[in-house]
Image: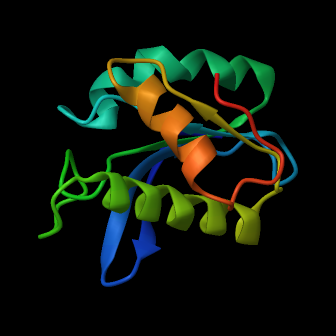
Amino acid sequence: MAWQHIQIPNGEFNIFCNAYISDKNAMNIICVHTPIITTLALQQAYEPFVKHGANIFAIDFSGTGKSINSERLSRKSFVKDLDAVVDYIESSYSANIHLYGPTGIGGMFAQYYATASTKLKKSCAI
């Protein structure tokens, strides 16, 4: 497989995602990073999961990086973004979803989302 850039629907806007799909039934990892640059600049932080057969979904939150739209980043918007990503993954892949916050405030965003949303069924924040 190869890295692919996909657009995940989120209402009237799309979320940019740098994705690597190993297998439809593999563990899914959502990479949540600091929103000051695009996820493409941080690929070295999450790329090692490829060796373990994981599906990787590294996103740019609404209004940041390559997810250009009129919505400003807020707690409400990043929960909405992650809800959309979880829905997308569950509809196309397995419900085995994990959060990974490798850089900056990404870990805090992942922890906040894990407690603020009821979307995650089998998950953990790494």
Q: What residue do we see at 11% from left, 70% from top?
A: 70
Res 53 seen here:
yes
Q: What residue do we see at 83% from left, 56% from top?
A: 94
45 to the left or right of 40: right
Res 32 seen here:
no
Q: What residue do we see at 64% from left, 68% from top?
A: 87
Count of numbered labels shown in the rendering: 0
Q: Is residue 121 above or below residue 29?
A: below
Q: Is residue 6 above or below residue 37?
A: below
The quadrant holding residue 21 is: top right
45 to the left or right of 88: left
The quadrant holding residue 7 is: bottom left
Measured from the top left, where is residue 78 in percent x and y? 37, 54
Q: Report the quarter where the C terminus lies.
A: top right
Q: Nearer the viewer, residue 9 or 72?
A: 72
85 to the left or right of 51: left
Question: Going by the picture, which residue comes out furthest to the right?
Answer: 25
Colour scheme:
rainbow
Q: Is residue 107 above or below residue 45?
A: below
Question: Going by the picture, which residue comes out furthest to the front?
Answer: 115
Q: Nearer the viewer, residue 105 or 24?
A: 105
Question: Going by the picture, which residue comes out furthest to the left?
Answer: 70
Q: Report the quarter where the N terminus lies.
A: top right
Q: Nearer the viewer, residue 27 or 104?
A: 104
Measured from the top left, where is residue 51 in percent x and y? 72, 18
Measured from the top left, where is residue 106 in percent x and y? 40, 28
